[in-house]
Amino acid sequence: MRKSKISNTVLFFAGTFLLTWIFWSLPLLYKLGYISNLPPWWGIGGFAPSVVGALTVLFSYGKEGIKLLFKRMIRFKSTMALYSFVVIFPLALAACTMLISTIVFNIHFDWSKLPDAYLIPILFIQILLLGGPLNEELGWRGFALPALLEWMNGLRASLIIGVMWAIWHLPLYFAEIPGYTSMPFFSYLLNVISLSVIFTHLYRKGGNQLWLCILLHAILNTTNWLLLPLMPEGKTFLITSIYALLTTLSAIFIMVIHWKDFMNKERQPFLKDDRF
């Protein structure tokens, strides 16, 4: 039984990487000069985690698993504390990064590049639908996390998903896609692994509530896309590394406070429909 669970998880990661990298190889080939035109649809590779995740849930747990997956995705009811964390954490992360950059390193941000306020909700919706959260979370936290939690503790599951999640983005680094070249890959790896720990805590604290993870992912990406254009040229590596360090410290703090939860040896069946 355990071998079957491991095989299904390996199948998910292999399928996700293969499907994504088929499409994400196109900007790399374009950069290297092997193709003269970059098809505008190359970005659909970013939907692979959710597509492969849903298919793997269907293959592994049948129709009952699919129903539960989408039930977790549209379960909006939660505590005010968890919703407050989801909203405040990304904003605090960005604010503290800017504050440290300004006070310690005398870096000044170009606030004139901040978009008009009415455009920010539009950017948020665009990112929610197309910029990562819905593209990915049915895979990373919809299938992979609960599947791994069936046979390992939360910390190990977080680390595995974090490493795979970061490596999954590698073609975008090699192709020098804007937004991905602003952070050294080591800092990015540290940042994503730390976020994986935070997402695991949020998912379990919310009673397997996938919506909270989708929302946090959306707000994090939105604040990042707002922050990047404000950074002065030549200082992005420093600023983004500060950001990654703060994310890591936040993850460590959460792990220390909730160490027993992360190291809990009690295994949780995928089809157990816990809720807040």
Image: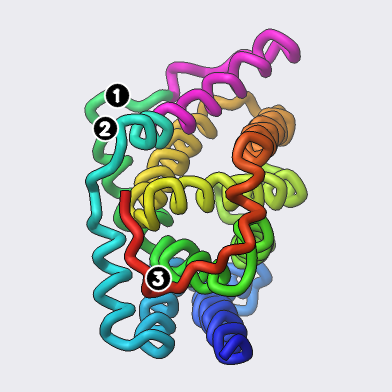
Please give the name of the residue rendered at 44% of the width and 46% of the height, measured from the top-left corner: 205
Where 75 sits versus 93, above or below?
A: below
Asked if the residues shown at circle 2 and circle 1 are in contact, with their CB atoms under 8 angstroms apart, the answer is yes
* Residue where numbered disc 3 is placed: 50
Magenta span includes 55: no
* Residue where numbered disc 2 is placed: 119
260 and 73: which is toward the camera: 260
Residues drawn in magenta: 87-113
Measured as percent of width and height from the top left, residue 53 is found at 43, 76
Name the residue type under label 1: Asp
What colouring does the structure picture have? rainbow
**Left or right for 196, reference 57:** right
Measured as percent of width and height from the top left, residue 98 is found at 59, 19
Asked if the residues shown at circle 1 and circle 3 are in contact, with their CB atoms under 8 angstroms apart, the answer is no
Magenta span includes 89: yes
Category of crowding for the residue at label 1, using alpha-carbon neighbours closer than 10 angstroms: few (below 14), some (14–19), many (at least 20):
few
Looking at the image, is mark 3 or mark 2 earlier in the sequence? 3
Instruction: Tell us which disc is closer to us: 1 or 3.
Output: 3
Category of crowding for the residue at label 3, using alpha-carbon neighbours closer than 10 angstroms: few (below 14), some (14–19), many (at least 20):
many
Category of crowding for the residue at label 2, using alpha-carbon neighbours closer than 10 angstroms: few (below 14), some (14–19), many (at least 20):
few
Instruction: Tell us which disc is closer to us: 3 or 2.
Output: 3
Residue 116's disc number: 1
